[in-house]
Image (cartoon, helix red, strand yellow):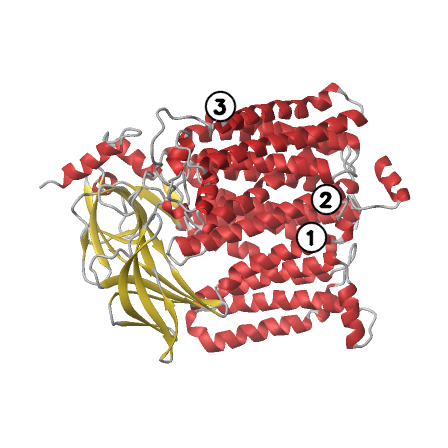
Amino acid sequence: MINELGHFALVLALAVAVVQTALPLVARAADGVLVRVADRAALLQFLLVGLSFGCLAMAYLTSDFSVRNVYENSHSLMPVIYKFSGVWGNHEGSMLLWVLILAFSGAAVASFSQALPPRLRLLVLAVQGSIAVAFLLFLLFTSNPFDRLLPAPFEGRDLNPLLQDLGLAIHPPLLYIGYVGLSVSFSFAVAALIDGRIDSAWARHARPWVLAAWMFLTLGIAMGSYWAYYELGWGGWWFWDPVENASLMPWLAATALLHSAIVMEKRGALKVWTILLSILAFSLSLLGTFIVRSGVLTSVHSFATDPARGVVILVILCLFIGGSLALFAWRAPRLAQGGLFAPISREGALVFNNLFLSTSCLAVLIGTLYPLALEAWDGSKISVGPPFFNAVFIPLTLPLVLAMPFGQQLAWKRGDLAAVAQRLLASILIGVAGMIVIYALRGEQGVLAPIGVGIGLFVVAGSIAEIISRAARSGGGAASVLRKALGLPLATWGAALAHAGVGVFILGVASTAYQVERIANISVGQTLVLADYELTLTKVERRDGPNYTDTVAMFSVARGGVVEAVAEPAKRIYPARQMPTTEVARITRGFGQVYVALGEVIEGNTVPVRAYWKPYVLLIWLGAVIMSLGGVLSLLDRRMRVGAPVPAKARRKLVQA
Amino acid sequence: MTRKQRRFTLIGAAGLVLALAAGMILFALRDSVAFFRSPTEVSEGKVRAGERFRLGGLVAAGTVNRGVGDRVAFTVTDGKATISVSYVGILPDLFREGQGVVTEGVLAADGSFRADTVLAKHDETYMPKEVADALKKQGVWQDGSKEVAKEVAKEVTKP
């Protein structure tokens, strides 16, 4: 019954989405009533999809195996949290989550973008509705999560054991909010193109949405990377795998969009480019959905892929990308030119940023799709791996991060590079000093890592310098500088924090060069020496969990003879699927981790072990978290909250514009 | 600077960066991609000496031999030809006899394959697309019939 209710709600949501899409066709002139209808439709669509999602979740929580989807991906013995996250641990459920977040984005626009001109709001919600129509049709006709099974089996086939982890509860929702959140700026762009009016107010309205999506995308990718790091047991955090690239490309485009929208809002320039980026960012999200769901590219992160249904996503993708780009080609030439600026200026720096971000995005795109193209061309199968991406991506992002501290400090219209360099002198010196010290200490491991450390330090110091130089502009003592720094707009702090996050991330990446790896067969009583740590195997034992059995190897972790912790890596077998997984033990020391993974245990008291000492590895993900925090601060800035109370005079101007 | 000049500098700079990137991409694509080969293709001599490539197929039943330390040897088959593979390291969780595998490495002088990477998969019902295609080519795989492939893996290894 609940199951059918969910199915029915989904059909109703489709009907509502059709209405929402068709509204602007009914009335051309901005009509107050119609806009309210569109608002209500967006909210209703969200409620209906939410109801549908709730029904599926209910089926999972009550282990209703008469629902095929539940039978195939759940088990009555599974802990409740995995039963719930199992809802999106499969193709149908994850597409439902996708649509849920899409509907949520639409409802959020209807609720928070009250200051948007009525005509534009109507169009934005219509475009948002059309995306929902496409994906609801896809769900209902090819991927219905509510299919029944008769007779109902007694027990489910269990969720893929690799997915029985807290990571599944966190990573996909975050990533999807980021992915699908970019649909809002896409809808804004398409609506503005249809409307034919694009000005700096547009950027003002669209920016908070881009920023919010970007924040979640950043967190989602970082969380996914950390999950793969501890779940797969290879000790890596990024493999340049197609599925990873699928999330990186929208991130690069969204980062570029974030910056170009600033130029558009403040200076009225780069309009055409910003609109194009809004379209491209979401197009790359769609492309990512296609790559992940269709399995056309062999990936280590592929779950529940289905090429046949992937083709349908490809059709949707072509429709939306093709349609929006055609509209762009038709309308864009009519856009007015923006303000003038010198090459050395804040605008110039942001153009530089966009140039390198989009070029590196293009490089990732080519590397990811090249195997597909080549196979279609002459049938040969190849894989493009880390050597390609490292050789191309790193040189392309290097100028970007080096220029970042400079760009922050340049003035609008015409900047003074020499003055900025003077203000950044301390930061440059810190970077160079760090580089020299690391090279002197660990020079035998190559020059790349010391350069990375130097750049990371320079970027972090540059962000601090940005705050200090702004606060100290009018002089005064330390106390007044501090007071002024605290009084700086939140957006300034947000930008500085996000950029510092990039520096922290680079420090984490550079430090991976200094990791220590040991692979060995260890018997009980033997000790493995790993950098400063001694790992002694004390016991191998079996432990039973709710729906699995662990073979646990207990290691005492000692430094200088003093036992500091116990690491308990395990090999876990899930009887329902007869599938083993590796449970990695991680001992955190400062920002570094001792990482211990087991191989297949053949004999009782001897275990194959892969152990790492990874200094400062946590900085990689911490950097991403800091970046997102910067986004939060910027979003909290008064100037970002378009819906916030505006003086009546300004509001009149906004509506007329 | 006039509007025209500004536009020229912008387009010039963009063109320069794009050209540089294109150069790097072409260079890297020539040097750092690995071709996927089936055992049949390898036995037909399609692989140059010292070339890095990916070898994919089924792990033949009964051939996995765990040697001293973390040394592992096994045989990869596509139903027609077989290649013996040696690997040092810890095998991924879902590495099993009779199942699909993709390994990356170089051919040794004695015709065996020295793998430095064995790719993991996440799902026991998942068959790497390249492996499935290679098996289809040999006529031992139809969509949805994993059992057939398993039988083949067993049969080939019978003495």
Q: Quadrant of the C terminus of chain B?
A: top left
User: What separation in Å lies between label 2 and label 1 (alpha carbons)?
Assistant: 10 Å
Of pointers 3 and 2, the one earlier in the residue sequence: 3
Closer mark to the observer between disc 3 and disc 1: 3
Q: Is residue A145 left or right of residue A638?
A: left
Provide the chain ID for the residue under circle 1: A
Provide the chain ID for the residue under circle 2: A
User: What separation in Å lies between label 3 and label 1 (alpha carbons)?
Assistant: 44 Å
Give the label on residue A141, or none.
3
Provide the chain ID for the residue under circle 3: A
Q: Is residue B53 visible?
A: yes
Mark 1 = which residue? A350
Q: Element type at marker 1?
A: helix
Q: Quadrant of residue B152?
A: top left
Which amino acid does the dot numbered 3 rest on?
A: Phe
Which amino acid does the dot numbered 2 rest on?
A: Leu
* Towards the viewer: A10 or A546: A546
Q: Quadrant of residue A625?
A: bottom right
Give the label on residue A270, or none.
2
* Towards the viewer: A19 or B14: A19
- Crowd rating for badge 2 (residues with CA inside 10 Å; few <14, some 14–19, many 20+): many
* Towards the viewer: A585 or A178: A585
Of pointers 3 and 1, the one earlier in the residue sequence: 3
Query: Could you tell me residue B120's position as x and y percent?
Result: 34, 48
